[in-house]
Amino acid sequence: MLSRDKLPDLELMQKVQQGEMVSYNTLVDRYKDRLFNMLYRMLSSEDEARDLLQDTFLRVWQHKQSYDFRYAFSTWIYTIALNLARNELRRRKKFRFFDIGDFADKLPSREEKKESSPKLKELLDHEISRLPEKYKTAFILRDVDSLSYEEIAQVLSIPLGTVKSRVNRARSILRKRLRPRMEECYELSKGSILPISIL
Amino acid sequence: MNCRKVQSYLSAYCEGILSSDRVEKLEVHIKSCKRCEQEKQFTERILMAARALPTRSLPEDFNLQLLNRIYAEQSRPTESYLPTEPRSLFGRRLGWLSALAAVSVCALVAVLVLTPDHTSLNPTESVPAYTSVEPMKVTHTSATRHTQPVRIYDDIIGVSGPSSHYRATSLDALRTMRVSGSPLESLFVAFQQRRDSMPAVGYGNSWRRSRINNANGLILQNAASRR
């Protein structure tokens, strides 16, 4: 018999529906980190991402009986988390509150700038947070979380073609914004692809 | 294949999901175009960097906190967890009816407010605002008494003065002055109605009331002089 860690999501979910908390805990362990990082990239706030992650898993537990086994569990849980994140972003648009700490966290200090220019990964992280919501969501799901286009279409309830065009658009925006930094590296490497670790 | 087309296919090319005939054309173009080759490399770097982005980790007690919250929510069910009864057809209908009633009341009020005062002596003449107009002394002859009612109305509105001079402002008092049935009577009734419809609060309203009382008084004065 397979241990719980190796059981597929659907089997675990069946056990969860019978009220088995251990299986639920296994599912939480399986998804919490990637969902947390996805929510963090969507909201740019660790505290809010943590709260929404808790809300997401709470909803999974509360609505376990309404889970439809025809769909993948990952799709379902991503849909819940993304809906919560979207609601939060919508709420933020309504009530725009700015905390000086938000900006202080995001912008590198003068000393940091002098010491070293940020790596491509850090710049990319920053640029992702600046993308328009629909492109950001598509890019994160596809290129960071590696969901298939079909899964993204299900999660976002949009046609497959729209997902592809959004991902493509997000990539071209990022390419455009990161071009100056990448051109520097390109000149340094004289056309050869540098390993990501030194960029 | 031109540069624009190549750049639109780069994303799919780097993921390896571009059809083989397009891959061939794209690679031919890239070999001869330095700019497109650069774009291809940029895209690849972005995709590689996206998969290796720094990750943040959750606190170790996240699962414990979550379970505590679940138990707390279960022991303290709120309204949202209770099964909600479906709304009855009657309830839904009542909602529509109340909305309809509200709309009709608004429409009725709008009609009453916007339509010209029927008690006014000349329906085409709009009701003048209660602004300060110089009082005019009108000499009414028996011939002009009912032929120039609007002018009289204007004069009444423009009158200012202490309202204490005109106390007999009831309809009965007016009738005793034998103006019953005349246009003046209907004008007086209109004034009474307008006054009664006004709320009794606020400086502006009391000021308006005094102006209307003055006007009513003048009606009586005119009626008395004619008598």
Image: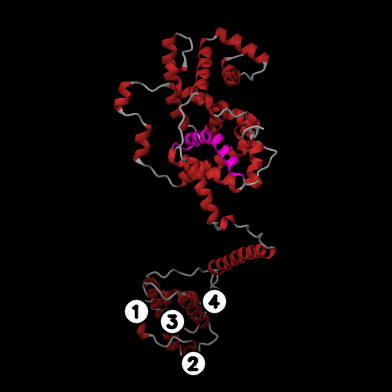
Q: CA distance from mark 1 to mark 3?
A: 12 Å
Q: Amino acid at mark 1?
A: Gly
First along the sequence among labels 2 and 3: 2
Task: Let me know if residue B195 is in the magenta part.
Answer: no
Residue B163 coordinates in the image, percent (x, y): 36, 82
In the foreground, A83 or B67: B67
First along the sequence among labels 2 and 4: 4
Q: CA distance from mark 2 to mark 3?
A: 15 Å
Task: Confirm or deny contact between disc 2 and disc 4 (CB under 8 A).
Answer: no
On the image, numbered disc 3 is attached to which residue?
Answer: B216
Q: Among all residues in the image, which is located at the extreme front?
A: A1
Report in which chain the residue with disc 4 lies: B
Q: CA distance from mark 2 to mark 4?
A: 21 Å
Q: Are marks 2 and 3 on the same chain?
A: yes
Point out the stretch of residues depicted in magenta: A20-44
Prevailing secondary structure class for the magenta stretch in the rendered image: helix
Residue B177 coordinates in the image, percent (x, y): 47, 90
Q: Residues within 10 Å of mark 2 (few under 14, many from 20)?
A: few
Give me the disc on residue B161. Answer: 1
Task: Confirm or deny contact between disc 1 and disc 3 (CB under 8 A).
Answer: no
